[in-house]
């Protein structure tokens, strides 16, 4: 699951076994000092980059090595510097090297004055020994609805992706896990000469941060998790959680849109609005409808489930589709993520968990069931994935269950990491506090709600968590309303 700063899951995650692992050798020995230099001509001169060499397999520290690309933007007021704040944009597969200078990351001068902001491309991503499976554009497209007549092709697609990845990058894939990325983060900490790190992670980055806190609690300082993943549903359950959240958002949208029938003409009751939508889906399945110059089938409409988290924008979109004539334009070239993005994402999604079913018929059963339970997106979520044919990762996933302090930020209507998942993360991190934006729409809180941003800034600058969980208002009302304790 990516932030809006990159893309959604893929584009947008535990088992009972927990393998206790010591800090990496790079963290216990005296690591070489990073050689900092300007990242590139297109980036600000103040953003410096360096490369850190780490083991591909931390169980074999003398074996094959890989590079981790990292960046640093120094604290603006060195005399007030507290330490380092690592940043992760989400994913899995999201590059984070330029995150310290990304204007979408809203931290404020008080935070920037106290921390060196540290970006990094996770292992296998971007400049960090990037992995590639040689996937075609079609093979990178994972949005595959369940249909009986196409299921065999979907199984073949999943098998092909897994086979290509095993052939092209098999030696690396089993080590591209969240646990090893957490070890890389601790190697970065050691190379920077820091006793502890602070952290801001978005979406999948919240799970990465929670795993780091579980593995390295003594090195964990101030952690902020924005739009949190459910650590108990890694990773198949996270897809299904999106389907559950999509239905809830769709029901809310239907109610809101019925109250605005005069503006949109989609129905004066929620039932009428839903009927209008499903009639549109059926019509588009017969003949695609035009959407901004590109044809959309009914499945293509359902695949955009995340739109319904934003009720007004979704109503405008559906009303425009309803008015559109059947599309006669040729299919446009689909903008897809690069192969490295998809390849590294599947490596984590499949390698992190050992709970993916191996039998294709299990996926068929789940897709049929979930399409009935969650009509908008359930079959997309539960249809077969390459993980059915993937080799297991190097170790079991992490059970997150600790007392580490953290601040969790969450929109009520988040299509990528639904509210229920963030609450599960809150329960797993017993020392955490949660800020919920009531009525907040969309994936990622930072920069959208002043009330939540104030809570983030106060925690990072003072180190003091709120005494209780907080509820902020919607983005429209938050500036005039103080946080409410709950």
Image: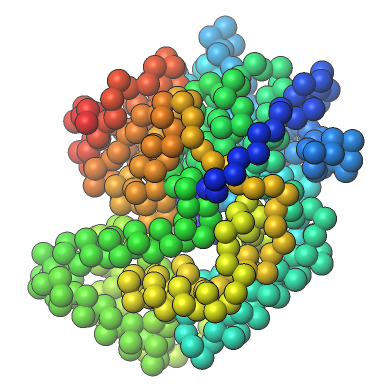
Q: Nearer the viewer, residue 400 or 31?
A: 400
In which quadrant of the rendered view does residue 353 lie? bottom right
Rendered residue at 78%/38% (across/down) = 58
Rendered residue at 68%/29% (across/down) = 186
List x then y, in percent, for residue 188.
70, 28
Q: Is residue 95 visible?
A: no
Residue at the top extreme, as displayed: 79
Q: Nearer the viewer, residue 331 or 353?
A: 353
Q: Nearer the viewer, residue 366 or 141?
A: 366
Compared with 182, 303 (above or below) is below
Compared with 221, 102 (above or below) is below
List x then y, in percent, for residue 409.
38, 37
Relative side of 248 to 224, left or right: left
On-image quarter of the C terminus: top left
Q: Is residue 143 visible?
A: yes
Q: Nearer the viewer, residue 48 or 131?
A: 131
In which quadrant of the rendered view does residue 73 lie? top right
Residue at the front extreme, as displayed: 16
Relative side of 399 to 69, left or right: left
Rendered residue at 80%/60% (across/down) = 170
List x then y, in percent, for residue 198.
55, 24
Relative side of 431 to 486, left or right: right
In which quadrant of the rendered view does residue 358 lie? bottom right
Name the colour scheme. Answer: rainbow
List x then y, in percent, for residue 116.
60, 22
Rendered residue at 84%/35% (across/down) = 61
Q: How many marks?
A: 0
């Amino acid at each position: 699951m990516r932030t809006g700063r990159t893309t959604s899951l893929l584009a947008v995650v535990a088992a009972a076994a927990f393998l206790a692992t010591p800090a990496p050798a790079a963290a216990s020995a005296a690591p070489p000092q990073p050689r900092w230099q300007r990242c590139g001509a297109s980036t600000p001169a103040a953003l410096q980059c360096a490369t850190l060499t780490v083991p591909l397999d931390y169980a074999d520290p003398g074996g094959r090595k890989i590079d981790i690309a990292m960046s640093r933007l120094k604290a603006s007021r060195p005399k007030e510097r507290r330490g380092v704040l690592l940043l992760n944009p989400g994913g899995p597969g999201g590059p984070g090297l330029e995150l310290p200078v990304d204007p979408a990351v809203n931290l404020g001068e008080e935070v920037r004055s106290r921390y060196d902001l540290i970006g990094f491309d996770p292992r296998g991503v971007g400049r960090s020994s990037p992995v590639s499976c040689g996937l075609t554009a079609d093979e990178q497209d994972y949005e595959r609805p369940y249909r009986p007549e196409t299921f065999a092709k979907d199984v073949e697609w999943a098998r092909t992706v897994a086979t290509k990845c095993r052939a092209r990058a098999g030696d690396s894939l089993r080590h591209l896990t969240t646990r090893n990325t957490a070890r890389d983060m601790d190697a970065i900490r050691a190379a920077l000469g820091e006793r502890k790190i602070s952290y801001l992670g978005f979406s999948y980055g919240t799970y990465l941060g929670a795993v780091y806190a579980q593995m390295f609690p003594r090195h964990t300082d101030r952690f902020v998790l924005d739009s949190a993943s459910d650590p108990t549903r890694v990773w198949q359950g996270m897809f299904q959680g999106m389907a559950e959240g999509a239905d809830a958002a769709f029901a809310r949208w239907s109610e809101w849109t019925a109250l605005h029938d005069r503006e949109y003409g989609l129905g004066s009751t929620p039932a009428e609005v839903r009927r209008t939508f499903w009639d549109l889906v059926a019509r588009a399945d017969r003949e695609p409808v035009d959407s901004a110059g590109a044809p959309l089938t009914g499945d293509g409409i359902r695949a955009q489930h995340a739109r319904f988290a934003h009720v007004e924008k979704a109503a405008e979109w559906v009303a425009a589709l309803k008015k559109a004539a059947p599309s006669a334009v040729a299919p446009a070239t689909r903008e897809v993520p690069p192969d490295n993005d998809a390849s590294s994402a599947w490596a984590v999604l499949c390698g992190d968990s050992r709970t993916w079913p191996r039998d294709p018929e299990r996926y068929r059963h789940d897709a049929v069931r979930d399409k009935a339970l969650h009509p908008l997106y359930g079959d997309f979520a539960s249809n077969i994935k390459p993980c059915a044919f993937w080799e297991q990762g190097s170790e079991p996933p992490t059970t997150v269950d600790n007392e580490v302090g953290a601040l969790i930020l969450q929109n009520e209507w988040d299509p990528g990491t639904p509210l229920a998942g963030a609450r599960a993360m809150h329960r797993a991190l017993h020392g955490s506090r949660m800020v919920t934006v009531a009525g907040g729409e969309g994936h990622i809180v930072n920069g959208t709600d002043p009330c939540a941003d104030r809570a983030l800034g106060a925690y990072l600058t003072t180190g003091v968590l709120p005494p209780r969980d907080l509820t902020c208002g919607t983005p429209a009302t938050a500036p005039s309303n103080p946080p409410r304790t709950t």
